[in-house]
Amino acid sequence: MATQPQPKEPCISLLYKFDNTHSKFQGFVNQVHLVIQFHLHHYSIGPAQVGLINTLLLGTTLVWFTFLLEHQSPLLNDFETFLEKFNATFGDSNKKHTSNIKQSLCQGSCIVAIYALEFRQLACNISWGDAHKSILVWVTR
């Protein structure tokens, strides 16, 4: 009986290390989740998942992680709790406020695709009433 060839793992490269730039936080966390998803056999348990993040930190974020490591924090064993604390420390603590500040976003001289992308990102963080939902659906098509 012939065995089925195993599909190759997708090759995923992380584009950058996280250096406490708030605007890059969510993208960084999304990349980490993607790597874990596609390489679950390497990162199947909390400590391995948290360790992956450690290898991708720079500057103050690395100093923060080093403190956790040196004090053998229980956060190092629980990925979800670690992410909550990581987000509270380095994420955008008030996404709605940030979006409201930028709600005067206008296209200016940038291309429509860039403008639409920025609009969609900001719209995700604002709780609009039903009256505005149809506008959001139309703009994001």
Image: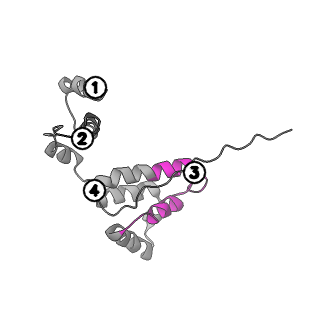
| Number of numbered discs on residues | 4
Separation of marks 1 and 3 at Cα, in angstroms: 35 Å
Circle 3: element type: loop
Q: Nearer the viewer, mark 1 or mark 3?
A: 1
Residue shown at the point (29%, 59%) measured from the top left? 21
Q: Disc 4 designates what residue?
A: 22
Mark found first going from the N terminus, 2 or 1:
2
Circle 1: element type: helix
Q: Disc 1 designates what residue?
A: 137
Q: Which residue is more in the foreground, 23 or 106?
A: 106
Separation of marks 3 and 2 at Cα, in angstroms: 31 Å
Q: Are marks 3 and 2 in contact (CB under 8 Å)?
A: no
Residue shown at the point (52%, 51%) measured from the top left? 12
- The segment highlighted magenta reads 32-58
Q: In the rendered structure, which amino acid carries the disc numbered 2?
A: Leu
Separation of marks 4 and 3 at Cα, in angstroms: 27 Å
In the drawing, what numbered circle is on residue 40? 3
Magenta span includes 131: no
How far across and how far down the image is residue 83, in percent?
39, 56
